[in-house]
Image (cartoon, rainbow, N blue to C red):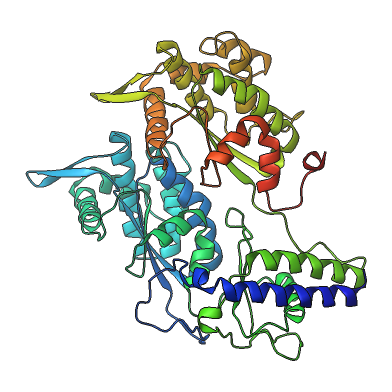
Amino acid sequence: MTGKDAVVLAKWAVALFMALAMISVNMVDSYPRPQAYPGKSEVSVERNESAPLLLEVYYESLCPDSVDFLLRQLLPVTRKIGNIVRVELIPFGKATWHRLGAEYIFRCHHGPPECKGNRIQTCGYHFLKQQNETAALEFVYCTMQAYDPSTVAERCAKKSGFSGKALLDCTRNSAGSHLQHKMALKTEALKPKLTWVPWLVIDGVHNDHIQRLGTSNLLHLLCSMYKGHLPNIDKELQNDNDIIANLLHLAPAMRLVLYKNNSHTKSCKCARISKVPATGTAPATNSKMLTSGKYMLVLTSLTIVFACASSKLHHKKNHHSHRRIRDAAPVLLEVYYETLCPDSRAFITNQLYPTLQQINSIMNVSMIPYGKATQKQDGDNWVFTCQHGPRECVGNVIQSCALKYLPLNNTDPATKISRVFTLINCMEAAKDPSSAGPDCASQQSIDFAPIDKCSKSSEGNQLEHTMGVRTESLDPKLTFVPWMVINGIHTASMQSRALYDLLGLICDTYTGPKPAACNE
């Protein structure tokens, strides 16, 4: 097919799509949008200057979802487009407090270590922000990368230009207590009330759209809400967008936002395309963008089609051109399981591990060993009751410790798979997973001593408690084990397919170039 044929085909496709879009315009109009600017016109006109968005993040220092959001979403966003958003961090979450004399006593969602972590981050963030907002954020990011923020607090403070001694003094005296109390009051004053952690507020507004999109795709949310010029436009992507614009010259004036889903990488950027001219010529980079009332369309699927078409046409003109569409973010798979559950064991050994062996490069896997267990607090510790008895509780704690002491970047050179998955697979294939740890570790040349020590201490107890909290926070609630969540979403069809065709499901979900195993 020649380039001319492709253009003709594209024009007919646009005309057909527009006709269908007119029929479903009411559905488009009903799509939930952020209400951050109530009362203002939906028509967006670019301005030379625009005030940055204010993003408030209410979180907990040891909450897995908070850690994931700050490190996977907020960190790359603030490093790349920090000039269009101001961030306010409020570490408190679902904690409670009461006054005792001149001091405040706090009880935190994930126990005393979290209270300590909250205070460390409150003190460091408060004092550093007065001098440099970027340094304040980097301090929090640094402490969030450790299981226990207190173990790295001094090092992170010095790295950010803050005295480690001053930080520790703040956390130990009334200054830290009063600062943390301010975080509590600010959290308790929220309207609507906080029901989830992390909780996001943008320009004073919280709604379901902001919460859901912000926690899964913060870059896209901020770019769509910001009214000024977007920074860091990807020039290569803009060139491809211009080709696409030429193919779309039959369409009415519209605003087309192309989002490059790299929020989990260091290359996350925003890109906008200008109004499509009627003449078919490529739009100027600095042209004003228009919207056409209710006919503004989010052409996600169509964009993908024409991006592919334009890439092929461009490649015909220049056989030595580089591939412009970069690899997409890996598929995020969360597996909520039980170490002695027959279905969990079958899934790990027959689906998960074989899939990792073939397409590990396009997956990020998170294991949560807890399932249908229950927990209750007894002093500073937690008492667990597991579906398959006490031995399962032992196995769950061991694997929770393994997930901490064998980080994902500790890979087997031969298989390129993280050693923790190899260990878990070996344990689940054994007759008794709860006692197979030492032998499996020995086979893989893994030092089992730190894992064993952790599993028999309060550290392992707290790790398993964190797994429990994460499981109990699922929405929808877990009703079957193993329970799968992909890119933050769980559906019945996804669950069913993952149990018998995980490789196919991951391949179909991944939006980048497919590995060879996906085509076999």
Name the spot of residue 354 as percent of width and height, x first.
Answer: 71, 28
Q: Quadrant of residue 240?
A: bottom right
Residue at the image point whose x is 78% and y is 44% from the top:
515
Q: Nearer the viewer, residue 368 or 437?
A: 368
Name the spot of residue 95 as percent of width and height, x first.
Answer: 25, 43
Instruction: Report the number of discs.
Output: 0
Q: Is residue 42 above or below residue 145?
A: below
Q: Nearer the viewer, residue 58 or 146?
A: 58
Q: Is residue 140 left or right of residue 423?
A: left
Q: Is residue 246 left or right of residue 474?
A: right
Name the spot of residue 203 as percent of width and height, x first.
Answer: 36, 70
Name the spot of residue 519 as percent of width and height, x first.
Answer: 81, 42
Q: Is residue 277 above or below residue 456?
A: below
Residue at the image point whose x is 91% and y is 65% from the top:
320
Q: On the rendered image, what quadrant is the C terminus found in? A: top right
Can residue 366 be seen by looking at this rendering? yes
